[in-house]
């Protein structure tokens, strides 16, 4: 009973901290999972019950804390952020939650970090792509060998304002990013990968490695 109450207390504190982070992100124009994204992401974590998460794009640590609030108690997150200021802000927020102890932060370019982590022989059962959208095909090529059978890759913003499926009236400046996201969707629909698209918001893709 006591343990139950402690757990409830931690959950309440976690939710309060995340509400504060949402307000910070809004005030400082930091892109974090939007309302739809949060709901889907939480559901993916709940279904997958991951033990080792790799996240590209820490921002202020919001999605890392959200995932750990749902994942099994032994779950860890490794997360990569390019911008030193965001890395530091995430560090402060993560230090305020007991869940933060299960997060390892990396400062640097996500593509480079994928090479390093692969070189270290790391594997993951849940990978979240949420850094540079134009790099998703590259991230996928590098991350896929680290994905365990039965594991999933979640990618945010894959529909890029709807242009990825309907590139009509698309401004020319978006051509490269949209082509790369289209390429990403081809890659993740090639066996042994199978992908479900969740088009609400900016689009989330849930890819499962089937063997
Ligand atoms: N996952 C976070 C959340 O929902 O709480 C939001 C991440 S935000 C959409 C994308 C983050 O990726 C930004 O903080 C950005 O600085 C970072 N980023 C952009 N390019 C990157 C790169 N090449 N390597 C690592 N991080 C990068």
Image (cartoon, helix red, strand yellow):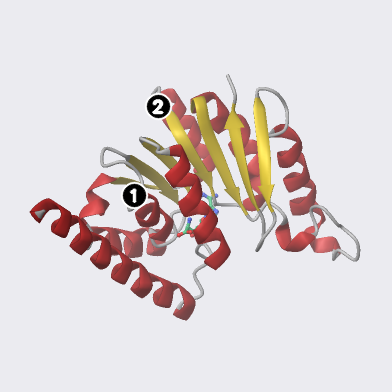
* Furthest-front residue in this view: 1
Query: Eyeballing the image, is 57 above or below 53?
Result: below
- The CA distance from mark 1 to mark 2 is 19 Å
The first of marks 1 and 2 along the sequence is 1
Q: Please name whichever residue, 187 or 6, is drawn nearer the observer in this view of the structure.
A: 6
Query: Eyeballing the image, is 201 above or below 49?
Result: below
Q: Which residue is mark 1?
A: 68
**SS at mark 1?**
helix
Using the image, tell me which numbered label, if any, was put on residue 183. none
Residue depicted at 25% across the width and 52% down the height: 99
Residue 179 point in image, percent of width and height: 80, 47
Residue 198 point in image, percent of width and height: 66, 52
Q: Which residue is mark 2?
A: 122
* Furthest-bottom residue in this view: 27
Marks 1, 2: nearer the viewer: 1
User: Is residue 109 shown to the viewer in this render?
Assistant: no
In the shown orientation, is residue 37 left or right of residue 189? Answer: left
In the shown orientation, is residue 137 left or right of residue 104? Answer: right
Near mark 1 (Cα within 10 A), the count class, few <14, some 14-19 or many ≥20, is many
């Amino acid at each position: 009973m006591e343990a139950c109450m402690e757990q409830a207390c931690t959950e309440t504190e976690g939710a309060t901290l995340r509400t504060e982070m949402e307000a910070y992100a809004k005030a400082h124009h930091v892109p974090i999972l939007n309302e739809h994204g949060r709901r889907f992401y939480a559901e993916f974590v709940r279904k997958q019950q991951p033990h080792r998460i790799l996240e590209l794009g820490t921002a202020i640590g919001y999605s890392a804390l959200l995932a750990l609030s749902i994942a099994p108690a032994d779950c860890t997150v490794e997360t990569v952020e390019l911008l030193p200021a965001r890395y530091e802000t995430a560090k402060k927020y993560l230090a305020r939650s007991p869940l933060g102890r299960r997060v390892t932060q990396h400062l640097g370019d996500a593509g480079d970090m994928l090479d390093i982590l692969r070189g270290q022989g790391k594997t993951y059962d849940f990978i979240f792509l949420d850094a540079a959208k134009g790099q998703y095909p590259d991230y996928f090529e590098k991350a896929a060998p680290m994905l365990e059978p039965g594991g999933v890759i979640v990618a945010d913003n894959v529909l890029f304002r709807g242009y990825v499926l309907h590139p009509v009236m698309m401004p020319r400046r978006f051509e490269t990013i949209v082509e790369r996201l289209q390429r990403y969707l081809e890659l993740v629909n090639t066996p042994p990968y199978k992908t479900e698209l969740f088009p609400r918001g900016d689009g989330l893709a849930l890819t499962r490695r089937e063997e």
